[in-house]
Amino acid sequence: MDILDNFIKKIKSVFKKRSEVDWIDNAYAKIEQQYKDKHTVTFRICNINKNNFQVKIGGLYAYIPIWHMPWQYLYLESWHVILPTLIGKVFRGRIYSINRTPLSIHIDASMPQFKTITPDVNVPYSGIIIRKSDKSIILDIGYHFDWKFGSLISRLHSTAFKSPETFEDCIPGQVMSIYFAGFYQLGVPIARLTPLSPEWHPDYIHSLIGKIVKVKVGKTEREQPVFIVEEKYEGRLPIDIHTYPDNLGTMRRAFTMLSNDDILFCEITGADFEKQYLTLKWNGEKDTFDPHFTDEIKRENSSIDFKEAEGLIKNGKSKLYNEMALSEMPLAMNDAVLIDDGHATARELIGKIVNVRVIKKHKSQVFLLVEGKYSGVLPITSNIYYNNARAVKEHFNQLPDGELISCKVLGFDERLELLTLQWYNETGVGEKYRNSIKNLLDLSILEKLKKLEE
């Protein structure tokens, strides 16, 4: 009887294996056809093995190299941290390698597959900590949306926490609640542990960047200056070589002479939403500046056309040019234009891409003609171009006088009648410099994460 039972089991085993082989052959044939037709396939995350994700497609196991996942992290361990939250999730990709014996299927899921989402300001979201350094933690807010919109990376600095102990308690894999507060200039979400106050709404703060505002000087008990912008914002006034590359010594001396209750005219160059302060650039003027100087510039501009201005600048006969060269102050006025269309027309250009003629560059002064009739200033600072400011400035300095470029209008100063510009990175740049500038300004997501980590 035992012999007969064993014989029957062997027969069933043979037929079962044959049935499994037939099923695998059928599943493989369907997947192979999708590969030949270059169709997009769906797969389900199962596990991770070293540098590959194990997934299932059509009932068969397949593999995805980490660098072919729908998004990227700088560090391999970040994938291991979020793996428990990814198991069972479905994504899309294309098969780029398939083999029957031995069975091997490889998928590339780096194709675009997520809708863009902008979180709401001051709304709490759940973020998972994917990495921790000595000074900050990196979170992925994509966890809150069950990864349906991919990855949304943000950072929290250690100073954002109530105490060093609270920061030390944070570990990778931990889920914490944060508030969205807009985007960094790199397009990375800004995270906070507490909601923003209404006056710090990102849309309003970004509208201030590029404007000239009054800043009141105060003094601490240790005689250290503090800066109050528009009577409600904290200001930071860095005096360094990046902000004042051509007149740092002059600005340092002027800085030491500031007194309590002085009123300065400063340009808002950036904002820190985490620590809630505005970054400023002082143009060297106090409330005692002579307004007749600006009026005199306008009168001179009204009698000079573009060709005359170009000739006067080259021959060193322009009164404005000589005034600026002697003072070495970072004024950036146009020596060829009279604004005669009113402030309303100039303000309508904010946010638009415009044509800009480079008339003349001299040290830190740049003479710009916007749309043939407006004065412009193009600050090349780290607040606008992040760590690429120096490289962008080098490329800008190579532009010949008279070059036509495209710029984005960031703001308009009614007092000085100046449009604040950002060199646009796609159109209007001279062919010789277009690709190099585009490469400088269009940071990849890996570079963005690296900047955050620094």
Image: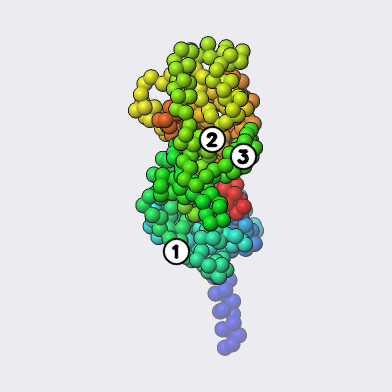
Sequence-wise, the earlier of marks 3 and 2 is 3
**Are the residues tagged 3 and 1 within 8 Å (C-beta)?**
no
Q: Label 2 is placed on what type of residue?
A: Gly
* Alpha carbon separation for disc pair 3 and 2: 11 Å
Q: Mark 1 points at which residue?
A: 177
Q: Can residue 304 be seen in this view?
A: yes
Which residue corresponds to the image point at 62% horizontal and 59% vertical from the top-left? 76
Crowdedness near tag 3: few (<14), some (14–19) or many (≥20) residues, C-alpha within 10 Å: few
Which image quadrant for residue 205? top left
Q: Which residue lies furthest to the bottom in this view?
A: 1
Sequence-wise, the earlier of marks 2 and 1 is 1
Q: Label 1 is placed on what type of residue?
A: Ser
User: Which residue is nearer to you in this view: 293 or 364?
Assistant: 293
Q: Any mark on residue 19, and which? A: none
Q: Mark 2 points at which residue?
A: 284
Work out whether 151 lies above or below 298. Answer: below
User: Which residue is nearer to you in this view: 118 or 243?
Assistant: 243
Residue 179 is situated, as x and y percent measured from the top left of the image, at 43, 58
Q: Mark 3 points at which residue?
A: 253
Which residue corresponds to the image point at 48% horizontal and 24% vertical from the top-left? 293
Crowdedness near tag 2: few (<14), some (14–19) or many (≥20) residues, C-alpha within 10 Å: some
Residue 385 is situated, as x and y percent measured from the top left of the image, at 56, 39
* Alpha carbon separation for disc pair 3 and 1: 46 Å
Crowdedness near tag 1: few (<14), some (14–19) or many (≥20) residues, C-alpha within 10 Å: some
Sequence-wise, the earlier of marks 3 and 1 is 1
Which residue corresponds to the image point at 49% horizontal and 49% vertical from the top-left? 218
Which image quadrant for residue 346? top left
